[in-house]
Image (spheres, coloured by chain):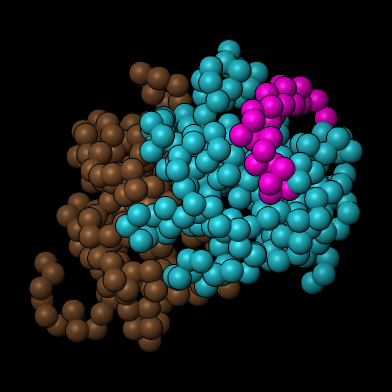
Chain colours: A brown, B cyan
Amino acid sequence: MALKELSSLEKALGLKKPNKYSTQGDKKVPVLQRSNGPALSGLVTIATYLVREANRAELLGESAEHRAIVQQWLEYRVTKVDGCQKEDIKTILKDLNTYLEDKVYLAGNQFTLADTLMYYGIHHIIVDLAVQEKEKYVNVTRWFDHVQHYPGIRNHLPPVVVLKNRVYTGSHH
Amino acid sequence: MKLFVSEGNPHCLKVLAVLKLTGVKCDVQHVNHEEKVVPHLSRPTLPALLLPSGMHLFSANSICRYLGEVSGQPSSDLNNQWLEWEASELQPAVAQALHLAVLQGKGSEASSALQGQLSYLEQSLCKKTTPFLTAEIVSVADVVLWAALYPILSDHGLVLGDQGKVQNWFERVGMLAACESAAQEVLQGKGLKSEALKAYMQKQPAPPHSQAQKRDN
């Protein structure tokens, strides 16, 4: 899973040469072998490195404060969303829904790496939501829809219909 | 900026030690474990940092990384890697070990819960030529890992096997004045025997997949 994500991220960042990855441990933590330095392990660590390699540092946040918020949501993705139990899903959706009430993206008004990785990590949860749940967590689904339509992000994942009225407007092609 | 912490919480040990180490100016407010500081989270989560913009940081590692950056130490790839390892690999094991040792009095099972992570740390330290995890000088990652392991490694009653490098590194970090004084403030300088730690643990949900939980079911 993490390897597919990293390859999608490479495409989204416009990195031309795909990197080679391996995994370590029971949890299959991704490892990147580099020619110009020691190997790096961990999804967030590697993703952060790729963004800098692609000269897209703005995706990591533009101030110390903004960068901290981006890193916090990246950590949330790998510690809370990954491997979450069924009973945790509701809390995650509820908390995200409250948080996103007054925000376009996870770190505010700008799209960042946190949106990309959260989108990849939460996709399987959103796919399974019933229509009523999508309405209940409307801020999450609105955010999700923004991200899946963000240029170049979706890659390996199928689109999810999140809001009924969107199907008929024909605005997304 | 305002930092909210509670007594007995090892995550608060992380942020107070880094705050003292970096000397960043910030108000510190002690609250109880149940205080809901971050409005958008359903569970009370501490520590929390109220940023100048009005937003909150609610992850101890992100707070530490932020304090490091504003004091002029931007996080390196290696620092990032250790912080991610701490949050995703070490924390689940520490939570289980603390649950066993503090709430169930099963010290020996607690050390076996941590064995894999401690061996990984031991191997990584064996490959290093520097006294600290990322460099010749202490980094945010050293303090975060030290604080996570503090309750367990500072307890000499626990037998942890052959982890000489980990012990030396742990003592090296713990000798820093910032760490020593934060350990006094949060855990009265005591490890597993701290009453404050016990009070904190009693408010935490049981870790998933813990032996204890399986047996109770």
Residues B79 and A24: in front is B79
At a point 51% along the width and 45% down the height, the residue shown is: B61
Residue B109 to residue A40: above or below: below
Instruction: Characterize the magenta stretch by its predominant secondary structure.
Output: helix
Residue B132 can be seen in this image:
yes
Residue B65 can be seen in this image: no
Q: Which residue is nearer to you in this view: A109 or A56?
A: A109
Task: Tell me which corner region of the image, top left, top right, bottom left or bottom right, holds residue B148.
Answer: top right
Instruction: Tell me where residue B146 appears, x and y as whole percent.
Output: 65, 36
The answer to if A107 sits in the magenta stretch is no
Q: Please name the residue shown 78% across and 37% down the image.
A: B154
Q: What residue is shown at x 38% (from left), y 83% (from top)?
A: A136
Q: Is residue A4 left or right of residue B203?
A: left
Left or right of A143 in this view: B168: right
Which stretch did the figure color magenta? B161-187
Q: What is the residue that sits farthest to the top in this orientation?
A: B129
